[in-house]
Amino acid sequence: MDVTAAYDECEVITRREAKNFSYGIRLLRPPERRALSAVYALARRIDDIGDGDWSVEDKLSGLSRVRKDVDSPTDTDDPVLVAMADAANRYRLPMHAFGELIDGCEMDVHGTNYETIDDLVGYCRRVAGTVGRLSLAVFGSYEREGAVALADDLGVALQLTNILRDVVEDRANGRVYLPAADAAAIGCPSDLSGPPEPIAALVAFECTRARSWFARGLELLPLLDRRSRACVGAMSGIYRRLLDRIEADPLAVTAGRVSLSGREKAVVAARALAGMSS
């Protein structure tokens, strides 16, 4: 398949599926934007397998096939794989990160629960820190001292915010991410059953944790060039604003998904773009 057409398809997937990610990457130069669209499209494929309606066996088989595609690429007409192979060569992407992402999705498929915050952080590093590390390579900051660790920290912050937003939806799908030890300390059932008030108290407690991960992860911004800084600033800004909303009313997440409007996201992205020269 033609590489340009392959990238075009990845950009279509990203615009259609990436409700927050796309606000950041549109601030990049076209080559980097296209490379990150390829990263997103492959990560989206992995997530969709893990979150699909298939049996556990079919999900694990699907994830195994993607792992093989990543580890042993062959000639293919698959646009996502074609674009990903080109981006990997151009930007020396740490492709092993996709293997870690698949590991995290397999944890979801198996229904892994988390006893402690350290257990949950390990999961967050697999499913979100990996994308941060791949992005660093595109930004050209992968080998800068401290950048990888900070990208992992920011990934933890973003994923914790996702988890807090989706508490009810995840519970309905049989997934509980919030640590059982924290739930016990708050007086909330570890399966998040029962009245909403204890769940809200647990969410409020975890908001404090997420905020501390943001404080560490955002130290990454000075290590990035102007456009990359704007990209990461836009994405993290959207999630920080979402965290602010959850923290202001943690009971709201027990009734449904808390979200930002498209206009609010656009404002955050515009501010990030305006701050590129600062």
Image: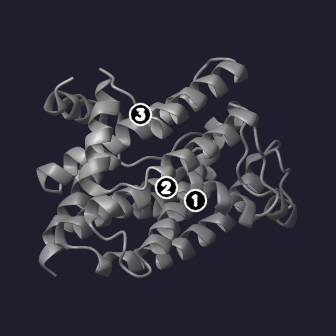
Mark 2 to mark 1 CA distance (whole Å):
6 Å
Write the residue at 50% across / 51% down.
96
Q: Where is residue 20 in the image (x, y as percent from the top left)?
A: 35, 48
| Disc on the earlier residue, 2 or 3 | 3
19 w.r.t. 233: above or below: above
Drawn side of residue 226 relative to residue 268, left or right: left
Write the residue at 45% across / 71% down.
148
Q: Does the CB distance between marks 2 and 1 fall below 8 Å?
A: yes
185 w.r.t. 111: above or below: below
Secondary structure state at the residue bearing disc 3: loop
Residue type, numbered disc 1: Arg
Task: Give neighbour class at mark 1: few <14, some 14-19, many 20+ (Cα, 10 Å).
Answer: many
Evaluate whether residue 18 shows in this view. Answer: no
Evaluate whether residue 277 shows in this view. Answer: yes
Secondary structure state at the residue bearing disc 1: helix
Residue type, numbered disc 2: Thr
For the C terminus, the quadrant is: bottom left
State the mark number for residue 73.
3
Give the camera-side residue of 190 and 126: 126
State the mark number for residue 125.
1
Residue type, numbered disc 3: Pro
Q: How many labels does the image show?
A: 3
User: In this figure, which residue is indicated by the disc labeled 2?
Assistant: 130
Write the residue at 57% across / 50% down.
100
Mark 2 to mark 3 CA distance (whole Å):
19 Å
